[in-house]
């Protein structure tokens, strides 16, 4: 075999090898490119799912903010003995004074995305930080104050059961107006400093709950803006 023939053979194999390498490189590049497109599509799906949940949470916040404020204002009227132009019923008064309202914002989508790895597709680090801040931040301030409120609420209920059982047994059944029922309850509070102090303590946690709810709402607004951008 002469030198020219050997060169032709070597050139042939070099070309074939180059074609193979190029084919593998192109295939690898295409797969990587396709994966990046798939990741972008998945990111859009993740952000869309989060956006849906944030809308639900926003409605929950609006509802809770409204009833939390309603209860607080009603309780203030009782503590201050200010019954002029009241717009609540005796049942609503009992909710404000001896009961509580819970707070359970939806987190099913966030939890699902967190554990199935969906959140990793979000490329914007600011969105990731905002998500963690929202779902694992100010919400717990609201929940912590609700827990404290529940502790006081149970003390109030126990105290009334032992010292003023008529509040739970008789007043609601009396054939009198709602205003007169509320007036009877208010008179009991004004003449019992222990009960009044318990209600003031409950009011303090109700106020703190609203402060943290406002922060939670601001955090939601920031996250919604980032997700929509």
Image (cartoon, grey):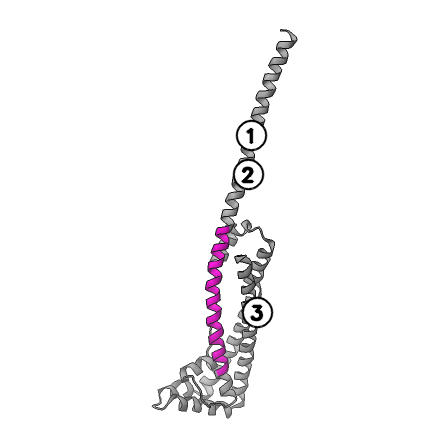
Residue projecting furthest to the right: 3
Find the magenta span and give its range. Answer: 44-73
Determine whether the residue tagged by mark 3 lies in a helix, strand or loop. Answer: helix
Q: Earlier in the sequence, mark 2 or mark 3?
A: 2
The residue tagged 3 is: 215
> CA gap, disc 1 to disc 2?
12 Å
Which quadrant holds residue 27?
top right
Q: Are marks 3 and 1 in contact (CB under 8 Å)?
A: no
Disc number placed over residue 24 in the picture, else none: 1
Disc number placed over residue 229 in the picture, else none: none
Residue 212 on image: x %, y %: 56, 71
Which residue occupies 61% across, 17% down? 11
- Look at the image and tell me whether residue 154 can be seen: no
The residue tagged 2 is: 32
Q: Is residue 54 magenta?
A: yes
Residue 108 on image: x %, y %: 47, 58
Query: Which of the two discs, 2 and 3, sits closer to the camera?
Result: 2
* Relative horizontal placement of residue 113, taking residue 177 as reference (left or right): right
- Look at the image and tell me whether residue 50 can be seen: yes
> CA gap, disc 3 to disc 1?
54 Å
Q: What secondary structure characterizes most of the magenta part?
A: helix
Which residue occupies 55% across, 28% down? 23
Residue sitting nearer the eye, 2 or 205? 2
Residue sitting nearer the eye, 169 or 75? 75
Residue 61 on image: x %, y %: 49, 69
Residue projecting furthest to the top: 1
For the residue carrying disc 1, how many other residues have a C-alpha within 10 Å: few (<14), some (14-19), or many (20+)?
few
The C terminus - image quarter:
bottom right
Determine whether the residue tagged by mark 1 lies in a helix, strand or loop. Answer: helix
Which residue occupies 57% across, 28% down? 22
Determine whether the residue tagged by mark 2 lies in a helix, strand or loop. Answer: helix
> CA gap, disc 2 to disc 3?
42 Å
């Amino acid at each position: 075999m002469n030198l020219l023939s050997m060169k032709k053979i070597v050139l042939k194999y070099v070309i074939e090898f180059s074609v193979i390498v190029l084919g593998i490189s192109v295939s690898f590049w295409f797969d990587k490119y396709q994966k990046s497109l798939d990741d972008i599509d998945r990111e859009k799906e993740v952000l869309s799912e989060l956006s849906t949940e944030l809308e639900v949470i926003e409605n929950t916040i609006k509802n809770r903010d409204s009833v939390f404020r309603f209860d607080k204002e009603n309780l203030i009227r009782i503590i201050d003995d200010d019954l002029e132009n009241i717009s609540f019923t005796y049942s609503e008064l009992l909710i404000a004074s001896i009961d509580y309202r819970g707070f359970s914002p939806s987190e099913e989508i966030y939890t699902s995305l967190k554990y199935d790895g969906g959140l990793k597709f979000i490329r914007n680090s600011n969105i990731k930080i905002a998500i963690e801040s929202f779902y694992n931040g100010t919400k717990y301030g609201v929940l912590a104050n609700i827990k404290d409120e529940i502790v006081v609420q149970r003390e109030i209920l126990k105290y009334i059961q032992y010292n003023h059982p008529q509040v739970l047994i008789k007043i609601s059944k009396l054939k009198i107006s709602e205003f007169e029922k509320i007036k009877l309850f208010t008179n009991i509070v004004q003449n019992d400093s222990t009960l009044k102090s318990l209600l003031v303590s409950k009011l303090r946690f109700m106020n703190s709950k609203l402060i943290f709810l406002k922060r939670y709402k601001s955090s939601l607004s920031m996250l919604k803006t980032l997700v929509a951008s």
